Image (cartoon, grey):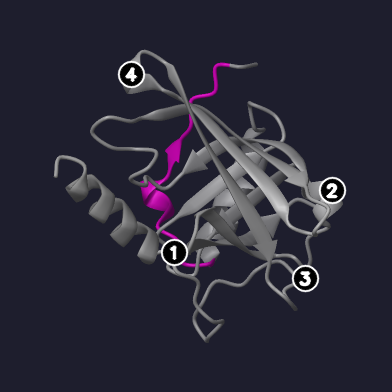
Amino acid sequence: MRYLLPLLLALSACASFTPTQPAPGLPQTVERVDVQRYLGTWFEAARLPVFFQDGERVRCADVTAIYTARADGRIDVLNTCRNALAGGAIRSATAVATPVPDSGNARLRVAFFWPFHGDYWVIGLDPEYRWAVVGAPSRRVLWILSRTPQMAEADFVRAVDIARAQGFAVENLQRTEQSVR
């Protein structure tokens, strides 16, 4: 019984990340993402607070995401962070991302555990793949990612401007501590 409530809360939260069909008023993704260029390590520069990274027992810092191609065309995902509220303990989660057909690989469905999927929409992308802006149709989640631990301020401002133009609550963005230089 002790674990039932947290499990139910986690399941209901995942249900809220169920993918939706494109409709008017939703964020616009970039036209195309070259998956081979997108693969590799990304550092989180900022995020909208979300329960699995910011809660009573977790405050993620040093957040990275590593994307690796699979033979079946999907992408393995490894998200890692250091929990600043637990003495720096490392937390990690694995998932599988599946590109949504006819999206130019700019929309992915990410499954951390079956049968629940989350939307991963690339709404901004540097032409050189140095940074990316990722959100979801609900606009409740947003991540600004960088290929380097410390993102150039001009690039960060550009990424925030993209998110703002798409209707995300950028006033609630929090910068992610990255101790790696």
Q: Residue at point 44% right, 64% down?
A: 139
Q: Residue at point 53% right, 85% down?
A: 23
Main SS, magenta region, reads loop
**Tag 4 or tag 2, which sits nearer the N-term?**
2
Q: Quadrant of residue 51?
A: top left
Q: Position of residue 146 (x, y in %)?
A: 67, 38
Q: Residue at point 55% right, 71% down?
A: 27
Q: Amino acid at mark 4?
A: Ala
Q: Which residue is mark 3?
A: 104
How much space separates mark 1 and mark 2, taking CA atoms? 25 Å
Q: Which residue is mark 4?
A: 86
Q: Residue at point 77% right, 70% down?
A: 104
In the image, residue 181 above or below residue 134: above
**Tag 4 or tag 3, which sits nearer the N-term?**
4
Do the residues under discs 1 and 2 have CB atoms within 8 angstroms?
A: no
Q: Nearer the viewer, residue 93 or 136?
A: 93
Element under disc 4 = helix
Q: Quadrant of the N terminus?
A: top left
Element under disc 1 = loop
Q: Position of residue 118 (x, y in %)?
A: 50, 61
In the image, residue 85 above or below residue 161: above
Query: Which label is found at residue 139?
Result: 1
